Amino acid sequence: METRELRYFVAVAEELHFGRAAQRLGIAQPPLSRAISQLERRLGVALLKRDSRSVTLTEAGAVLLREGRAALDAVEAAEHRARRAALAATGRPSVVLATKAGASSELLAKLLHAYAAESGSVDVDVVLCGPGEQERLLRTGRADVAILHHPFDDLTGFDTEELLTEGQVAILPAGHPLTTRTSLQLSEVTELPDLPLPRWPANDGTYPDGPGPEAQSHSQLFQLISLGRTLLIVPDSARSQLTHDLVAVPIVDAPEVTTVIAWPPHSRSRAVADLVRAALRR
Amino acid sequence: METRELRYFVAVAEELHFGRAAQRLGIAQPPLSRAISQLERRLGVALLKRDSRSVTLTEAGAVLLREGRAALDAVEAAEHRARRAALAATGRPSVVLATKAGASSELLAKLLHAYAAESGSVDVDVVLCGPGEQERLLRTGRADVAILHHPFDDLTGFDTEELLTEGQVAILPAGHPLTTRTSLQLSEVTELPDLPLPRWPANDGTYPDGPGPEAQSHSQLFQLISLGRTLLIVPDSARSQLTHDLVAVPIVDAPEVTTVIAWPPHSRSRAVADLVRAALRR
DNA sequence: TGCGGCGATACCCTCACGGTATCGGTCATG
DNA sequence: CATGACCGATACCGTGAGGGTATCGCCGCA
């Protein structure tokens, strides 16, 4: 199976529409139809059910979508890592560290400081990501290490070390009735009619439906909270970024968040190993 | 990057010889040369050093070999798993379990028995593998679950549960001087001039150099031990297969062997989950 | 100095892949 | 119920990527 065929299938499986998928791929619709049915013939397996008027995945199609995405990530990772290895061998070596924008900056600062103090340390390119984006960078080889957050990010397939486990707090606008409380239950904040939870763009850039406001960044969100339009549930350490018109209240029954440092298995990079050791030493 | 290019590169990187690699791939040498240099041009990276008379890997080439193998495995796995999903959806579903031939058959029997007794259990195809082969089957999607042995097999990228941890014993021919001992040091058995360690075929089917006899199967090995030509270091549980002319002596400082049940992450199969639960219940 | 081994180059041919035009089936609408 | 819109499949064509053969150039070796 060629990666081109996989890319084509994944596009169709995600769009569930040959026309849109073809547009996304930059080709015409007929060759796409042909490529997919050829793939099905070669695999000897029906991947899509072309019900007139709508396209749906078969069981096998759903499996190939999941596994195919992983395979495409692996191919892309091979490419990126090879390129980066060549750069490291000739020019000045460096590590790319991906982390969520606006998360536990204190931890990160300590880590970078501790690592930089080591002998033989190399430049660290810090990439600030939107939520969940670090995982993608790591899986596709565009980052060498990442700071991820269990259980939000999917850690399967990575080597990891735990750095910090903490509870979560609700960030509320100052003056809101709930700010008088010293602790909250999760159920008390998830369905507030006056403060609906914000909506984040999904991987494809679209927003899920719901009452809450749309947001792309933490700074936007904090502003929206100040305006009394939404609230936020975040790990405890985000308190350090609170401004005067925001209040944090612990949520006792929210799942604990574990911050981990993650890297691809078989990583031969000394820099990554050093960075992890520095992280573990705090 | 297309999988064809990756396959070509991996072949050359493994053979370190364009002619042989081309032969292995079933194409002529010139198109292979072209494909590789084209790949290098597109990546903007030198992968091979064509020293006159010999081909060697560059730093980037070594990385691409490692990562490329993993990527090719992932692509192959996507293909196999999709096919198997289609079969499971139409015909009678089944699970493929890969295990090392002649290893802890007692554990396996219990596991299969416990699982078969469950309601909703499906057929289990047990595949007996040569050493290290289970890992390959699992990585390429030809098996759904495998019994692996830490630290011999590489578990990175799999979800695993530990089943059993045990020490190792030396299997010696009856009457050998060392059989009078109740325990041994590793150093006492690895370099015996009269009983050199046997040689296993590597992944490419060739044998490493050395004084020991060549062997492909456990039964062959046991016979070779009986004949006083070699000895074997195996996990404790292999004792159950001893015949009268073989003796096992514990090796106190050998690394402990952990038998684990492993499956690919994101496995959605209920059968795999049931099988793992059955294994954990003993 | 000639020979053999090996990768690169030159040149040709084929077919796989992409494009346009069009069909056939189905739903929505007046 | 007829018509148009939508959508995937099919028919047909052109181009270029990828494979083949012949040969070169370089190097080590007898």
Image (cartoon, coloured by chain):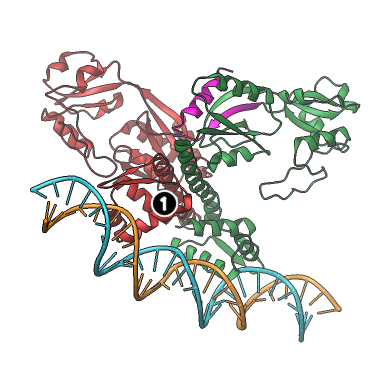
Chain colours: A green, B red, C orange, D cyan
The residue at the point 52 percent across, 24 percent down is A121
Can you identify the residue that label 1 sits on? B6
Is B179 positioned to the left or the right of A146 in the image?
left
Q: Chain of mark 1?
A: B
Query: Do we see residue A174 in this rendering?
Result: yes
Residue B11 in the magenta stretch? The answer is no
Estimate the x, y position of residue A263 in percent, counting from the top left: 52, 33
Is D27 positioned to the left or the right of A75 in the image?
left
Query: In the rendered structure, which segment of residues is drawn in magenta?
Result: A257-282
Estimate the x, y position of residue A35 in percent, counting from the top left: 51, 66
Q: Amino acid at mark 1?
A: Leu
- In the depicted view, which residue is nearer to us: B91 or A124? A124
Estimate the x, y position of residue B26 in percent, counting from the top left: 30, 59
Q: How many numbered marks are there?
A: 1
Q: Quadrant of residue B182?
A: top left
- In the depicted view, which residue is nearer to us: B101 or B233? B233
Quarter of the image that includes the N terminus of chain A: bottom left
Estimate the x, y position of residue A91 in percent, counting from the top left: 49, 36
Query: Is residue B218 positioned above or below B181 on the image?
Result: below
Quarter of the image that includes the C terminus of chain A: top right
Query: Is residue A91 positioned above or below A69 on the image?
Result: above
The residue at the point 86 percent across, 24 percent down is A244
Q: Quadrant of residue B110?
A: top left
Query: Do we see residue B118 in this rendering?
Result: no
The residue at the point 64 percent across, 35 percent down is A152
How packed is label 1: few (under 14 Cα within 10 Å), some, or many (20 or more)? Answer: many
Query: Is residue A252 positioned above or below A262 on the image?
Result: above
Element at label 1: helix
Is B37 positioned to the left or the right of A34 in the image?
left
